[in-house]
Image: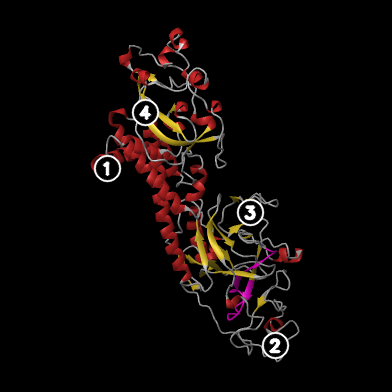
């Protein structure tokens, strides 16, 4: 029986064709005699696995599975569409977020309706051609190459045409409200997560270890879309053009990410030329890089008029080795021996640390030489989600273990006051007061604004995992200690390192706190963003 001879079609020209196809008793296939009554652009293409979602792919508003030719005398469309729920489920794709997925074997043609919308004729893998359906471009996922192959079967795109279309799409991208919004936030990952999730746009891959694969996939798909637009010529599909703009934005993000990764690697290499223990630099949040205005240093610099007297007036001569019971430097300076045999702090109390110096007779393996031997843990400078750059550990750190030293430019208190005015306006909190004397007044400060090491990137927390200790080694000037960070507790791998910017040490006695008042100088109050259960809400000053 011919399709046009079906009694239901004679009764109503707007027969729901999908119902006919679903009812195997009414029709098995479209007969040759019916082909002249329908317009269908058909071409064969190479098989490829592609997919589209159960809920998104099929649209109930489709005006006909096949559209009658105007020459047939009936310009009205055959209404209705074949839905995914009507298809017997043969394959489920577990990597899809919403609903069932069906595989597209090929796209056989397209039809442009009266509203100027293109509908693409889809042959489904493992289903009879009688179950082919027309679908809009926004319902077809991962089909960019299949679409290009179908369209280019009758038109091979020329380079000049492709370049012109590329330029046209790029102009549209630059005017896109989405692109402008992303530019303002420096393409921050959380904003990119709101990006329309077209097929291959995987933000986790772009900001992860599979970036190169994501870049190549997006680039290849974008070229397929461009060539498809060229092949469509005066039948330009608005939906396909919108997809091209989205892919051009994704491609722009990838190109920026590629440049960023190159710069981050250069910065990491430059840092590791100075560090004896490797430092990683990573940003999986946005497209920022470290500032090139900061000089990375692994030794203390001195400001104008400042001199560090590295000439200790004491040195030990421990016969049986340095330890808690020997007459070591710490005992000579009326303090306690700081470290256990494993090089970790014996106690976390805020007591001054005096390490052995060049006058001492002990070897470099002496247990009282920790900070001066440098760090041996792997750390990374990384971009945090909410508060700029930070530092994390790449391995577990035990309680009391030395982590790193705070380095920068040693300047006088008077110079610090001048810089405070400038830095306070620019919100640059990198000056560390050396206020470890009993009167609490710092005569010197370490400024890590212009030069410093990775410690300058350590963030604040009201419940930190690091403590700051004053350490004297070669220089025994009471107002010029070195600043060392030690683990306050066991710190897990990949955990961010933090210390209290106000240095409110819970190990200080009440008497010590009274004797050493905090001087905030020119620093203005700042809202604390640490988010810990012990958060004081404000930094630098009482509420």
**Residue 106 belongs to the span the image colors magenta:** no
Cβ–Cβ under 8 Å for marks 2 and 4: no
Which one is closest to the eye, mark 1 or mark 4?
A: 4
Mark 1–mark 3 distance (CA, rounded to whole Å): 60 Å
> Relative to residue 429, is residue 73 drawn left or right?
left
Which one is closest to the eye, mark 1 or mark 2?
A: 1
Residue picked out by circle 1: 163
Mark 3–mark 4 distance (CA, rounded to whole Å): 69 Å
> Relative to residue 156, is residue 88 drawn left or right?
right
Report the residue that reaches farthest toward the front. Answer: 1
Using the rendered view, name the quadrant where residue 260 is placed.
bottom left
**Residue 472 belongs to the span the image colors magenta:** yes
Residue picked out by circle 4: 110
Residue picked out by circle 3: 541
Which one is closest to the eye, mark 3 or mark 2?
A: 2
Residue 430 is at least partly visible in this image = no
Mark 1–mark 2 distance (CA, rounded to whole Å): 76 Å
Residue 169 position (above or below residue 482): above
Q: Magenta region: which residues? A: 470-490
Q: Residue at x 63, y 54 (%)?
A: 541
Which one is closest to the eye, mark 1 or mark 3?
A: 1
Q: For numbered disc 3, what is the local secondary structure?
A: loop
Residue 354 position (above or below residue 35): below
Q: Residues within 10 Å of mark 4 (few under 14, many from 20)?
A: many
Q: Earlier in the sequence, mark 2 or mark 4?
A: 4
Q: For numbered disc 1, what is the local secondary structure?
A: helix
* Front one among 221 and 271: 221
> Relative to residue 168, is residue 7 drawn left or right?
right
Using the rendered view, name the quadrant where residue 318 is placed.
bottom right
Cβ–Cβ under 8 Å for marks 1 and 2: no
Which one is closest to the eye, mark 3 or mark 4?
A: 4
């Amino acid at each position: 029986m011919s399709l046009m001879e079906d009694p239901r079609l004679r009764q109503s020209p707007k027969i729901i064709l999908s119902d006919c196809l679903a009812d195997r008793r009414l029709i098995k296939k479209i007969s040759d005699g019916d082909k002249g009554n329908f317009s269908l652009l058909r071409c064969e293409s190479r098989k490829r696995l592609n997919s589209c979602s159960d809920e998104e792919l099929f649209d109930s508003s489709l005006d006909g599975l096949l559209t009658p030719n105007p020459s047939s005398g009936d310009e009205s469309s055959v209404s209705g569409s074949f839905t995914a729920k009507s298809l017997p489920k043969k394959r489920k794709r577990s990597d899809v977020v919403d609903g069932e997925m069906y595989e597209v074997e090929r796209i056989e043609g397209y039809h442009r309706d009266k509203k100027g919308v293109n509908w693409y004729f889809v042959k489904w893998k493992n289903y009879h051609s009688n179950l082919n359906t027309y679908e809009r471009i926004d319902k077809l996922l991962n089909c960019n190459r299949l679409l290009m192959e179908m369209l280019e079967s009758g038109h091979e795109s020329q380079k000049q045409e492709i370049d012109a279309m590329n330029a046209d799409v790029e102009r549209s991208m630059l005017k896109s409200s989405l692109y402008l919004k992303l530019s303002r936030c420096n393409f921050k990952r959380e904003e990119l997560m709101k990006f329309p999730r077209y097929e291959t746009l995987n933000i986790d891959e772009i900001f992860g270890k599979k970036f190169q694969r994501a870049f190549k996939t997006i680039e290849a798909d974008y070229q397929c879309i461009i060539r498809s637009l060229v092949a469509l010529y005066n039948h330009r599909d608005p939906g396909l053009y919108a997809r091209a703009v989205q892919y051009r934005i994704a491609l722009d993000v990838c190109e920026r990410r590629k440049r960023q990764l190159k710069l981050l690697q250069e910065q990491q290499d430059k840092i590791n030329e100075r560090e004896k223990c490797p430092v990683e630099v990573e940003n999986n949040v946005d497209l920022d890089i470290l500032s090139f205005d900061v000089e990375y240093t692994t030794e203390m610099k001195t400001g104008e008029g400042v001199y560090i007297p590295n000439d200790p007036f004491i040195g030990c001569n421990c016969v049986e080795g340095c330890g808690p019971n020997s007459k070591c430097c710490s005992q000579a300076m009326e303090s306690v021996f700081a470290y256990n045999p494993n090089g970790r702090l014996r106690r976390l109390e805020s007591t001054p640390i005096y390490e052995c110096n060049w006058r001492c007779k002990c070897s470099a393996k002496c247990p009282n030489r920790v900070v001066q031997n440098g760090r041996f843990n792997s750390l990374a400078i990384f971009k945090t989600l909410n508060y700029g750059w930070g530092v994390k550990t790449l391995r577990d750190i035990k309680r009391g273990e030395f982590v790193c030293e705070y380095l920068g430019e040693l300047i006088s208190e008077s110079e610090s006051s001048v810089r405070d005015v400038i830095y306070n306006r620019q919100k640059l909190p990198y000056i560390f007061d050396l206020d470890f004397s009993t009167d609490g007044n710092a005569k010197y400060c370490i400024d890590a604004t212009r030069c410093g090491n990775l410690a300058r990137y350590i963030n604040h927390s009201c419940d930190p995992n690091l403590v700051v200790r004053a350490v004297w080694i070669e220089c025994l000037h009471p107002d010029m200690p070195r600043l060392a960070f030690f683990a306050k507790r066991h710190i897990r791998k990949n955990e961010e390192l933090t210390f209290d910017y106000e240095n409110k040490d819970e190990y200080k006695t009440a008497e010590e706190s009274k004797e050493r008042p905090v001087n905030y100088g020119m620093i203005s109050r700042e809202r604390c963003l640490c988010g810990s259960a012990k958060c004081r809400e404000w930094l630098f000053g009482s509420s």
